[in-house]
Image: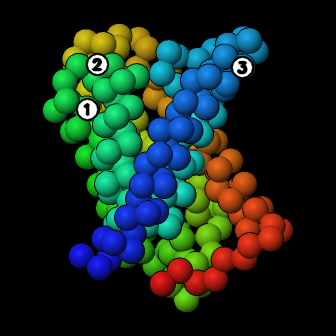
Amino acid sequence: MAKLKSNLPMIIFFTVLYVAAYQLQVSVIYPLELRLGWEITHKASIFFVPAGVMLLAFYFLRLWFIPVAVIGRTILYMQFWGGDTFLESLSASVFVALIYPLLLRVFENAGWYVFGTEDDPRFTVTGIVIFQITVTLAVAFFQTGKLVLLDRLQDAEAFQYTVHLMVGDVLGAVGVMYLFYVLFKYGPVRLGPIR
């Protein structure tokens, strides 16, 4: 219970930040992409900021990130992404919430500490990119497969949808993590080891 109390402010912060990042996405980035004439699908952006917020939440919270993913994504699935039922929205959110720690464990078992260690929490851009590509591939296959099976996405659009998800999530995650890195490397606040 003490761990929950200590992590609750960050859980709330990242959940609100995730939902707010999507509002930024809808009100600023999507319209900008449409004006530039980029080929985007209705639900996939070339630079998806919420993916970066999700990755940043996972960096800070590890397993305590699960409520952020479940609550934040369920809210967005229900309101914006066409989740017809609460159960459908919740199942997609739970998949996302569990794939991050599962893939991190796979990477660590292979001896690759994508986010550093407790004593040295530095991450590398290469590690972040490869980790996010792996996460996004899993989510994209799950999401695309679900949409095709539910007849909400045509087979001919599935590849384009998956590619847009890949590009948007990876660029969004790398962009947010890079801004985080610059802020804490050159800004007024320095991060020490996360314990």
Residue type highlighted by circle 3: Leu
Residue type highlighted by circle 2: Val
Q: Residue at x 65, y 50 (%)?
A: 176
Secondary structure beneath disc 2? helix
Q: Is residue 95 above or below residue 179?
A: above
Residue type highlighted by circle 1: Ser
Q: Residue furthest bottom?
A: 119
Q: Mark 3 — residue?
A: 32
Mark on residue 42?
none
State which tag comes first along the sequence, 3 or 1: 3
Would residue 134 be seen by someone viewing this image from the given angle?
A: no
Q: Is residue 84 above or below residue 120?
A: above
Secondary structure beneath disc 3? helix
Mark on residue 148?
2
Nearest to the observer: residue 123 or residue 89: 89
Q: Position of residue 30 (x, y in %)?
A: 62, 21
